[in-house]
């Protein structure tokens, strides 16, 4: 049985935050590891928070933010 891992909004934001390379690298490694294992869980609330935060805090254009989410 696979243990599922719930990802919080902050971890997803670190994937795109160029201000913190260490956190970005760690978030990327964790995301990849759990995605490959099919153990990654993201709630609807986290998806909504990600979209709002990535557009407001990181300044990513809304249409690009939508594409980023679809690549998950």
Image (cartoon, rainbow, N blue to C red):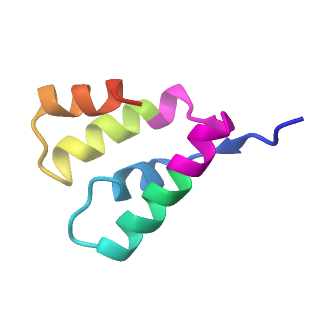
State how many labels appear: 0
Say above or below: 11 vs 46.
below
Say above or below: 71 vs 59.
above
Is 18 in the magenta? no
Residue 20 vs residue 53, the one in the foreground: 20
Where's residue 66, x and y in %?
24, 26
**Which quadrant is home to the C terminus?**
top left
Quadrant in which residue 54 is drawn: top left
Quadrant in which residue 2 is drawn: top right
Q: Which residue corresponds to the image point at 81% horizontal and 42% vertical from the top-left?
A: 3
Q: Which residue corresponds to the image point at 28% horizontal and 46% vertical from the top-left?
A: 53
Which residues, given as a range, are shown in magenta?
32-46
Q: Which residue corresponds to the image point at 51% horizontal and 48% vertical from the top-left?
A: 32
Quadrant in which residue 60 is drawn: top left
Say above or below: 43 vs 49.
above
Q: Which residue corresponds to the image point at 11% horizontal and 49% vertical from the top-left?
A: 59
Where's residue 44, x and y in %?
51, 26
Taking the image as shown, residue 3 lies to the left or right of residue 26, namely right
Where's residue 57, x and y in %?
20, 54
Is 36 in the magenta? yes
Residue 55 vs residue 69, the one in the foreground: 69
């Amino acid at each position: 049985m696979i243990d599922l891992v719930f990802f919080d909004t902050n971890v997803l934001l670190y994937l795109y935050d160029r201000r913190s390379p260490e956190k970005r690298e760690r978030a990327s490694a964790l995301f990849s590891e759990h995605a490959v294992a099919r153990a990654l869980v993201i709630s609807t609330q986290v998806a909504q928070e990600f979209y709002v935060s990535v557009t407001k805090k990181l300044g990513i254009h809304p249409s690009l933010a939508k594409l980023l989410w679809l690549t998950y």
